[in-house]
Image (tube, grey):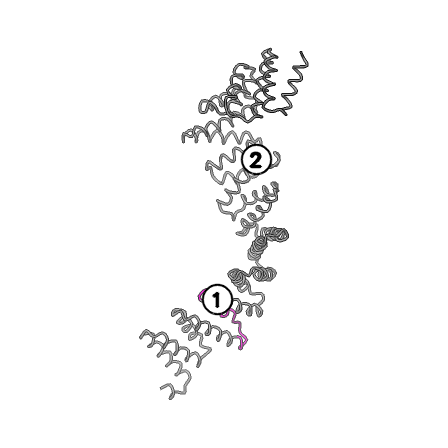
Amino acid sequence: MLDLTSDRVTKVAIHRKMAEAALKRGSSDDAASNLKEALTLAPEDSALFTELSALFESSEKWYDLIDLLSNEADRQRASGRGESTLTFRAATIWEEKLSSPEAAAELLEKLLAEEPENVAVLGKLSKIYETMGDQEKRRQTVEKAIPVVKEPKERAQLELLLAQLERDVGSDASAEASEAHFERAFELDPEGSSAPVALAGLMAFARARGDHAKEAALLQKMIMASAASVDERRRSALALLEQIRAGELIADEARALLERLAPHLAALGEDPDLLDARAEADFRAERFDEAMAIFQKRVVQLERDRRRRDVARVRQRLAAILERRGDLQGALAELTLAQQIDGAHPATLSSLARIHFGLSDWEKARKLYRQLLLGSLEPQAKADVYLHLGRIHERLGEPQKALGMYELGVEFDGAHLQLKAEITRLRGAK
């Protein structure tokens, strides 16, 4: 019948009808054959192209679909029309459906030669080179993309990718380049999704160099970054607070930093780990009012949870604050409560002994220092205890006993300057 029909439109219509009938019979091959004939007769018919490409896709005829896309791309190119989406789709099929990244890369490289500013092609090529393990080509592709991309957020993403590629090289020069790319990524997108990734990369470099000041500044930015997740901000807060607690920052800087971050830290909530870290950092930075408020809150929580040893630890901290303020009786009260929980804790005994010494309660101080000697102390700590015992005996008017204590102390720490000085002084007084 088709041979007798000269009208092109009629022939196309007949092929369509035959394709519909073939699909009803379940013959996708016959349907595809008729649609191909129709498309040959009417190559400009976009509906036919869409029907045939959908049929190839649903029946997973990937090679046929690639041929169809390539032919249509050639036709559009010949007519002076853009065809990048067709080539891009064909490349995607090579990569994702046929597991042939090399074929996909070949198509995209040709397309990129025609459209060097096509960001989608640059991004796709970069990922394909990653799959192929060709990191050098991947880096070159990303470097080409950066000056082309106009949107700062997209450029930041590319800078991040270059930073990661340079970091993976592992050389000193590549590490320096990686850090520079992280810096540029943050500058391009300080409030966006690139910021947390860039800050994390920069922090790793600062930490590796032991640059505590820079790491602290970066942690501060992470805590304040609106795009960072709550977990990222919380982890950064804990890391920064630990830096302060460990004395890695100058006290004045730490104090100013904590004051600036106070509302941001409060916004992270009051989970126990964060509260403890905040209190310890405040204590180290001599923000005693803030530290005391948190420690008092923690005592209530810990007593409620029956965590007695932790209660003792916090009471020791409260005592230390009160002692610094000159409230020895208040400190003594806190330490007495701590001792009731753990009577042999060295830090509690040492603090109690020191306060009784400060109150000139020589007998109680002496008993506490002697109790300390019964525990497991490092040699230098034992030498310190003997120094205090010697001074108590001197206060009691017993210089010979004092000398004996000093001499015992030197046996544990022969380089103890204070003990040596006291021995020389007492021997010289004879």
Tag of residue 246: 2
Q: Which residue is mark 1?
A: 100
- Binning the other alpha carbons within 10 Å of mark 1 as few (below 14), some (14 to 19) or many (20 upward) gives some
Of the residues shown, which amino acid type is indicated by label 1? Ser
Q: Position of residue 315 (x, y in %)?
A: 49, 26
Q: Is residue 99 magenta?
A: no
Find the residue positioned furthest to the right.
428
State which region is magenta.
77-97
- Binning the other alpha carbons within 10 Å of mark 2 as few (below 14), some (14 to 19) or many (20 upward) gives few
- Please say if 26 is above or below 425: below
- Please say if 161 is above or below 94: above
Q: Foreground residue, 98 or 43?
A: 98
Find the residue positioned furthest to the left.
25
Secondary structure beneath dot 2 equals loop
Q: Position of residue 258 (x, y in %)?
A: 56, 37
Magenta stretch, overall SS = helix
Along the horizontal axis of the image, is 274 left or right of 392?
left
Q: Foreground residue, 217 or 163?
A: 163
